Image: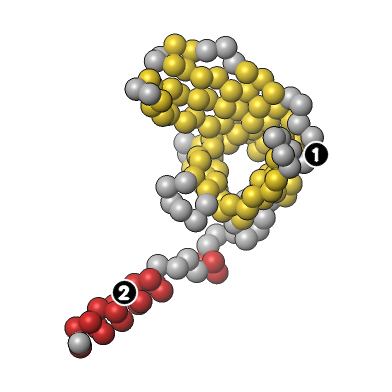
Amino acid sequence: MKKLIFILIAVVAALISCQVNKTTLPAPNTALVGTWFLKAQVSDNIIQGVPGIPDTVINFTTNDFYKFNVDYTVNVSTSMPTASVATHYYSYAADASGQVVIIGGSNSKNFTTYIVNKLSKDSLLLYSSVSQTLSGVAVVTNTSYMFTH
């Protein structure tokens, strides 16, 4: 019985110590914080190494936006197929090789990494590349997102 209680205390202590202390996180990039309206999206599927024809979408509304908050949450709003808003977590990193934004849920397996091609006062360009195998066929989807404040 004493071993069971000890194990239970150890597990609870481990879980508590794994929680993120937001007071120790660096301040978010102030240029990223705010509401960014999606203006264009260009996607290209590469199937078995053969590039497809890029698909450009520009019919976005003011309901299509990413709102980056100072508490490391991002509200992603879409107008199609139906209007919806989802809240995710994000992180921003910059080093000599470039800048990235990682957006995802609390599940560490459910996230997307975006390369920041441009971040200025009024323009944000993000790029993502997702590789997957569908029915035994290798597919890479490259997508560029263009936002304005």
**Cα distance, mark 2 to mark 1?**
46 Å
Q: Do callouts 2 and 1 mark residues in contact (Cβ within 8 Å)?
A: no
Residue 24 is left or right of residue 17, and the answer is right
Q: Secondary structure at mark 2?
A: helix
Q: Residue at x 73, y 42 (%)?
A: 83
Q: Quadrant of residue 56?
A: top right
Identify the coloring: secondary structure
CA neighbours of label 1 inside 10 A, class few (<14), some (14 to 19), many (20+): few
Residue 136 is left or right of residue 110, and the answer is left
Assign the C terminus to one quadrant of the image: top right
Q: Residue furthest right?
A: 62
39 or 110: nearer the eye? 110
95 or 107: nearer the eye? 107
- What kind of residue is marked 1? Thr
Q: Residue at x 23, y 82 (%)?
A: 4
Q: Residue at x 25, y 78 (%)?
A: 7
CA neighbours of label 2 inside 10 A, class few (<14), some (14 to 19), many (20+): few
Residue 113 x %, y %: 50, 40
110 or 40: nearer the eye? 110
Q: Residue at x 62, y 18 (%)?
A: 55
Residue named by callout 1: 62
Q: Secondary structure at mark 1?
A: loop
Assign the N terminus to one quadrant of the image: bottom left
- What kind of residue is marked 2? Val
Residue 120 x %, y %: 70, 38
Residue named by callout 2: 11
Residue 103 x %, y %: 55, 46
Sooner in the amino-acid sequence: mark 2 or mark 1: 2
Residue 78 x %, y %: 70, 40
**In this rendering, does residue 135 appear at all?**
yes
**In this rendering, does residue 121 appear at all?**
no
